[in-house]
Image (cartoon, rainbow, N blue to C red):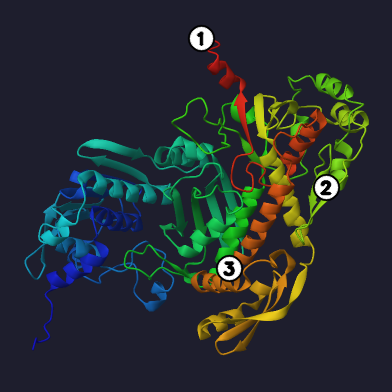
Amino acid sequence: MQRINLLSPRLANQIAAGEVVERPASVVKELLENSLDAGATQLDIDVEQGGVRRIKIRDNGVGILKDDLSLALSRHATSKIITLDDLEAVRTLGFRGEALASISSVSRLHLTSQAEGEVEAWRVETEGKDMSTSVRPASHPKGTTIDVRDLFFNTPARRKFLRTEKTEFNHLEEVVKRLALSRYDTGFRLSHNGKQIYDLRPVTDQLHAEHRLASLLGKKFIENALTIDVEAAGLRLWGWIGLPTFSRSQADLQYFFVNGRVVKDKLVAHAVRQAYRDVLYNGRHPTFVLYLELDPATVDVNVHPTKHEVRFRDGRLVHDFLFSRIHKAIADVRPESETEGASEGGLSVSQGVAQPEAAITEQSALPLANRPVNSTDWMRAPQSRVAVDQVAGQLEGMRSLSGYANDYASSGGYAPATGNEQVDPLTGEIRQTPAPSLNVATGFAGSVQEEYQTVPPLGFAVAQLHGVYILSESENGLILVDMHAAHERIVYERMKTSFYEKSIATQPLLVPINVSVSQSEADLVEENGEVFSAFGFRVERTGLESVMVREVPIILIKADTEALVRDVISDLSANGVSDLLEARANELMATMSCHGAVRANRKLTIAEMNSLLRDMEITERSGQCNHGRPTWTQMTMSDLDKLFLRGR
């Protein structure tokens, strides 16, 4: 029978290194976090062979006292926490006291440091099975340098699992990128095999912060990003979120920081995904760099050895805060004049999924800005180059045609010339209504002369192309609008407003549906009854392991009720919150709005097209249809000049 033995210090550290030191990138992460905790404002990282051969990191922090150098390489030795109270409100990136001991057990590590206030520098290294330390004088400026050579030299099995040099360096570079995004006040210099990769200087203002973002994530991101900075209930969220049309095929441009610590949290991911749900194309992923600040005592960072995961004390509050703020920021985006963005060369944001490989068909940058729905600031802009009299003249010539504009605002629906399909948002019933007869000359044309001193953001319609696209002349060029996609979004937003503002129509079930669940799932239903009742469901617990559905909303009367209830319970169990009922209702309303929107090959009058453009300018999320496709794009005069080689 095997006897119980006490492990040697080196073997114990090597076991711990299995959790902390996965690859060279893990080493860089731990060492850089230590440097940042030491107050460093400049970090120099030199790497050879992807970090396997050598990792050298120098900082200008407070340094380590001579008497503490030996302790620095011991397990469970740290200067960052002392008592349990410190652990429950961690304010530093590191706190476990395992990194240096673990790294030194699987590499040849030398640590040189001169502490603040000391006149001499000292160097420490470990050797032997017991990892005894030796300290000797050295030459070094204030701060610390850690030199890690031959990673995993004494654990060949671990070294076999490393990837190619390029792959390992890509992981290492990603770590540096994340930390550079978390600390704008710190300079980062990274070189690989003698070649400089990054040289990022400390920044203190938003303009230079955006330059750092562009350097790390590419100019496209910052050109297609919205700035967000909101605060409520002791939480502050700030950063940049990408427009829905600037999405990715994979979740590789998503950075979220909690009190300066980069984390990957399923609660956060769920909130962001929910905020983008209505506007993101199928299978695409949003882009964002977001920073959440809150009381350290309300978040537990001691969840995982690598500290990538956190646990919030009030997860639902954090989830709802993130969702509501991001959702509102996206909804507030409206088409805006390109005068500041395109004409003055300022930052702009793009409409449409980027297609780098298609030079001519790539959608151009369209600046969007956050403005109130009823804002008329753009009306006070300089006089447009488009002749308003010319537009008015076109409309005057349509006196005898069926009018549209006046009745559109009062009826709230879109009226084709031969009749219109109106969709009841509560029942889903589609009704045919006759087309109104309006006087165009006294309707829209008059408003053009009296109201529009300048060109609206989406300009004025000039023609319809093949019954599908609206061509509009704007202040800066040509705008093309997919009329079905645009009207689909308008109808959808109006249906949602009508649905959620009124009391939800419900239908009691003649035969209630009994759903067998586990005891814990039945407890969830009982505790989260408001999740169901908010959408017209009446779900009651009838036994230890059963619940009964007695009432459902009319809009979901044909849905698979039992499967839907089970999915909601599963979502509640996994995330603590659920939006499946809202998602299902919105999905049905999106389908209805698609059927109720104006169809392709339907000829529109100039007045109808202009009225549609005006509605787009005041409708939330009008840049995308219900399926996430772009509704409009633009070609500026400079884009057109390039196509025809003008000015060359």
Q: Is residue 19 left or right of residue 180?
A: left
Q: For this rendering, which residue is in front, 218 or 139?
A: 218
Q: Secondary structure at mark 3?
A: loop
- Give the residue displayed 26% in from the left and 47% down from the top: 167
Sequence-wise first label, 1 or 3: 3
Quadrant housing residue 382: top right
Q: Position of residue 387 (x, y in %)?
A: 79, 19
Q: Position of residue 565 (x, y in %)?
A: 60, 73
| Disc assigned to residue 578 | 3
Sequence-wise first label, 3 or 2: 2
Q: For this rendering, which residue is in front, 337 or 639?
A: 639
Query: On the rendered image, what quadrant is the N terminus found in?
Result: bottom left
Q: Is residue 501 left or right of residue 233?
A: right
Gap between marks 3 and 2, in whole Å? 32 Å
**Which label sits in the foreground, 1 or 2?**
2
Q: Amino acid at mark 2?
A: Gly
Q: State whether residue 532 appears in this view.
A: yes
Residue bearing the label numbered 2: 412
**Which label sits in the foreground, 1 or 3?**
3
Residue bearing the label numbered 1: 648
Callout 1: 10 Å neighbours few (<14), some, many (20+)?
few
Q: Amino acid at mark 3?
A: Ser
Q: Position of residue 638 (x, y in %)?
A: 58, 20
Q: Secondary structure at mark 2?
A: loop
Q: For this rendering, which residue is in front, 503 or 220?
A: 503
Gap between marks 1 and 3, in whole Å? 58 Å
Q: Secondary structure at mark 1?
A: loop
- Give the residue displayed 70% in from the left and 45% down from the top: 488
Q: Amino acid at mark 1?
A: Arg
Sequence-wise first label, 1 or 2: 2
